Structures are given as structure tokens and as C-alpha cells.
Image (tube, rainbow, N blue to C red):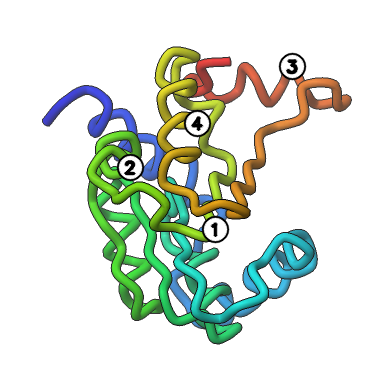
Amino acid sequence: MNSTVEITNAYYQTTATRSHEATLAYYEENAAALLRRFRRWLPESKDANCLDLACGCGEFVFLLETLGYKNVAGVDLCEEELIHGRKFVKAPLFDADVLDFLRTSSTASLNFITALNFLEHVSKEKLLEILRECSRVLRPGGTLVAMVPNAVSPFGSLTRHWDITHEW
């Protein structure tokens, strides 16, 4: 097992499991919260090709499926999270490195990509490569929605240092 996968799995065990529950009620509540936050960026067409980067347990994929999107997928390095997600989503959840997955994706093949609470975990070098690949695989007019911690918030330094997997 490489160190990135090992760290990702340890992160799930020590951090992510605190907020995740493998219940339908959890997924439904989470979907409602995600919809409130991200509704304005969702594709109009339910046939849009959508990819959730570092999808974790598939909560955003669950939201998209609930809304009727037909072409949805997620990718993550943590097999344990994907196992939980597969209990609640029908879409494929790929066990792969995000950058490797994007590199093997066809040019202009996606309409919508999400990267929620993920990009702060990669080196600046890898971040640039990921963003270039997102640009390459997005169709003209496609959307990338990214969310990272707000460093200027009152909890900014806490967020930076409580999680050793944050690169920046």
C-alpha cells in the first residue's frame, strides 16, 4: 500500500467517521444541505456527465442521483468510504487517485465536476495538474465547483492545523 492510500484510509478512520453515518437518513439530510449550498451550480440537463472528485462516501453523488441526474460517477482513494457509499448510490464509485483518473478520462467528456474539501489536501504541484486535467475533460461551458476551507474565517488557523493532511 502506498503512503497516500495509507494516509487516506487513516484519515477516514480518525476523522471522517466522526461525521459519517451509513444510514439513509444521514444521506437524505446531507443531500438537503448540499442542495441548499450548491443548487445554483448544478447542470440544467439531467443528462449532464457529472464527476465528484474525492467523493468519499458518495454523499454528493447521492444528491445528484436523487435529483434525477443519469450520468454520475465518483472517484476516491479510500476503499472503505466507497464501500459505504455503494450501499446508497447506484452510480459507479471508482477506487483511484483523482489525477490518474482524470488523466485517463476523455477530453471534453464532462459537463460538471465537483471537488469539495479536497484540493487543500494535495500539493500545489499536484493541484495545478488536477486543475489542468479538469479543464481538459470539461466540455466547453462545463462547470468545476470547488470548495476549500476559508483561511480568513475565525477558525482558519484551526482548520489548517487540526488536520495534518492539509497541504496548504
Establish if 46 lies above or below 118.
Answer: below
Q: Secondary structure at mark 3?
A: helix
Distance from disc 4 to disc 1, alpha carbons, whole Å, reads 13 Å
Local crowd at mark 2 within 10 Å, few (<14), some, or many (≥20)?
many
Local crowd at mark 4 within 10 Å, few (<14), some, or many (≥20)?
some
Q: Quadrant of the N terminus?
A: top left
From the viewer's side, name the closer residue of 111 and 162.
111
For residue 52, side relative to residue 116 (left or right) = left
The residue at which mark 3 appears reads as 157
Q: Label for residue 112?
A: 1
Place of residue 9 in the rendered image (x, y in percent of width and height, measured from the top left): 30, 39
- The mark nearer the N terminus, 4 or 2, is 2
Residue drawn at (54%, 64%), measured in percent from left and top? Answer: 60
Place of residue 29 in the rendered image (x, y in percent of width and height, measured from the top left): 66, 75
Distance from disc 4 to disc 2, alpha carbons, whole Å, reads 10 Å
From the viewer's side, name the closer residue of 16 and 122.
122
Local crowd at mark 1 within 10 Å, few (<14), some, or many (≥20)?
many
Look at label 4 and name its amino acid: Leu
Place of residue 6 in the rendered image (x, y in percent of width and height, measured from the top left): 24, 31
Nearer to us of marks 3 and 2 is 2
Residue lying at the far right of the rendered structure: 154
- In terms of image quadrants, where is residue 73? bottom left
The residue at which mark 4 appears reads as 131
Look at label 2 and name its amino acid: Leu
Residue drawn at (60%, 23%), measured in percent from left and top? Answer: 162
The residue at which mark 2 appears reads as 102
- In terms of image quadrants, where is residue 93? bottom left
Distance from disc 3 to disc 2, alpha carbons, whole Å, reads 31 Å
Look at label 1 and name its amino acid: Phe
Nearer to us of marks 3 and 1 is 1
CB under 8 Å between callouts 4 and 2? Answer: no
